[in-house]
Image (tube, rainbow, N blue to C red):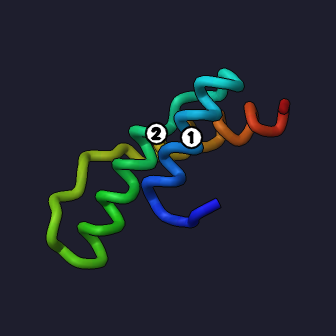
Amino acid sequence: MKKNHPSRVKAAEELHEHHQLPDVAELLGDLNETRKSEAYGDVEAPELNAEDVVTAIQDYVSEVEKL
């Protein structure tokens, strides 16, 4: 498996579609845009709430553990 952002989004979409895991594709995109904003300053970072991000990640990990 490739280790780049588009391949991770695709994997997240497939896991959501085929295994009913939470849909985190948009979150992955927002996190990537935030990374690029901080690293390069060439894009505007999306507005993210840290607590919401942590909750989404915790929920996702919990669902993955159930597989």
Residue 64, x across and y down, in percent: 76, 37
Tell me whether the residue at label 2 lies in contact with that at label 1, contact meaning CB atoms closer than 8 angstroms: yes
Residue 41, x across and y down, in percent: 18, 74
Residue on which disc 2 sits: 25
Q: Residue at x 51, y 43 (%)?
A: 10
Local packing at callout 1 (Cα closer than 10 Å; few below 14, some 14-19, many 20+) is some
Q: Residue at x 28, y 72 (%)?
A: 38
Q: Earlier in the sequence, mark 2 or mark 1?
A: 1
- Find the residue positioned furthest to the right: 66
- Find the residue positioned furthest to the front: 1
Considering depth in this image, is 1 or 32 the residue closer to the camera?
1
- In which quadrant is the N terminus drawn? bottom right
Q: What amino acid does circle 1 point to?
A: Ala
The numbered mark at residue 55 is: none
Residue 26, x across and y down, in percent: 39, 38
Mark 2 and mark 1: Cα distance apart in space: 6 Å
Question: How many numbered marks does the figure carry?
Answer: 2
Q: Taking 38 as reference, is 11 above or below it? A: above
Quarter where residue 6 is shown: bottom left
Q: Residue at x 84, y 32 (%)?
A: 67
In the visual, does 60 lie left or right of 42? right
In the visual, does 42 lie left or right of 53? left
Q: What amino acid does circle 2 point to?
A: Ala
Residue on which disc 1 sits: 12
Q: Residue at x 64, y 34 (%)?
A: 15
Q: Taking 38 as reference, is 1 above or below it? A: above
Local packing at callout 2 (Cα closer than 10 Å; few below 14, some 14-19, many 20+) is some
